[in-house]
Image: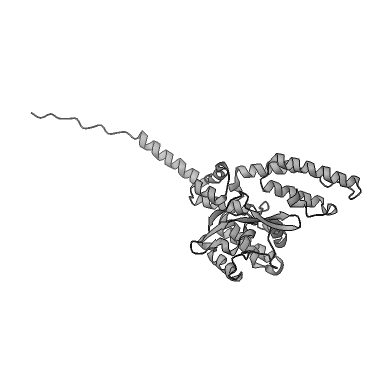
Amino acid sequence: MVPTLGHLAVRMITNGALDRTVQNWIADEHSRSTVKNTIAVLVRVMEQAVRDGIIKVNPARVTGWQKLYKQAEDELLDPRALALPDWETLVALADALVTASHDQYRGWGDVVVFAACTAARIGEVSGCRVGDIDTNQWIWTVRRQTTPAPGGLTDKGTKGKRARKVPIIEEIRPLVAQRILSADPDPDARLFTGPRGGRISTAVLRDATHWDDVVTKLGYEHLRRHDLRHTGLTWFADAGVPVHVLRRIAGHGSLITTQRYLHPDVHKITAAGAALSAHLNVLRAPRSLPSPIVKTR
């Protein structure tokens, strides 16, 4: 509760702020009991504020979050369903978000493309520094993420509390190289920032690009910023990356979570059926009898 709402005065905690906070907790995969218990604490705190005359109505009595949680659980069972289909769709999304943003800031599109192609969280993209990029081997060492905190945004360790290495594919290397040049040689400079040099969060990206309106017009009204990560992991899985390698790229604590991205698509299922039929046909094929042995005297 403190990292997400602790920087706000009680009077500034609105129903909308709480709804977005609960949605972020769910998206960050906090357990159902964690969300439930945290809301209970919020209700008691805000109820006391009502008694003290600080606010008139308790905004923490959030309703409908259980339905959102169930929806998130269903999505996580099949995260592939949340992925963008191909590279062209990703580029079209990035371009549309740039067009919709104030002053058409190209950096928003770079963040979106980079996040999808590295299967990273937006907070991890924001926490990326120039020194984290190895341009010899084109590998990004993910060391930190930017998260909400009292007083604003702050950097902390990754969700798994350990660094991990992620490949930077050829398609985005020019983008990364240009960002490094723009950031000067300072290894501590952020690779991605807002138009005024500020830190980026999923909420900042959403508001600055009019995300909800853009994805709705493109036919992806349910697409969230976190689904860029689902996109990258799905693409890695479809490319044949072994599950143990995919798990390290994703930074998953559980192998079960990674295996959800390995569900084959329709073409692979059809191919599997054809392969089995071919195998059974071989087994059913009549076998030729050996030629009789003719004894000679």
Vertical relation: 295 (above or below) 244: above
Q: Residue at x 55, y 57 (%)?
A: 141
Q: Residue at x 67, y 48 (%)?
A: 28
Vertical relation: 107 (above or below) 216: below
Q: Position of residue 164 (x, y in %)?
A: 55, 53
Vertical relation: 89 (above or below) 37: below
Q: Residue furthest left?
A: 297
Depth check: give the residue in front, 17 or 52: 52
Relative to 237, is 224 on the left or the right? right
Depth check: give the residue in front, 46 or 157: 157
Q: Residue at x 23, y 32 (%)?
A: 290
Relative to 134, is 283 on the left or the right? left
Residue 257 occupies which quadrant of the picture?
A: top right
Q: Residue at x 50, y 46 (%)?
A: 244
Residue 131 occupies which quadrant of the picture?
A: bottom right
Q: Position of residue 1 (x, y in %)?
A: 75, 48
Relative to 126, is 288 on the left or the right? left
Residue 276 appears anywhere in the view: yes
Q: How many marks are shown on the rendered structure?
A: 0
Q: Position of residue 23 (x, y in %)?
A: 72, 48
Q: Quadrant of the C terminus?
A: top left
- Colour scheme shown: one colour
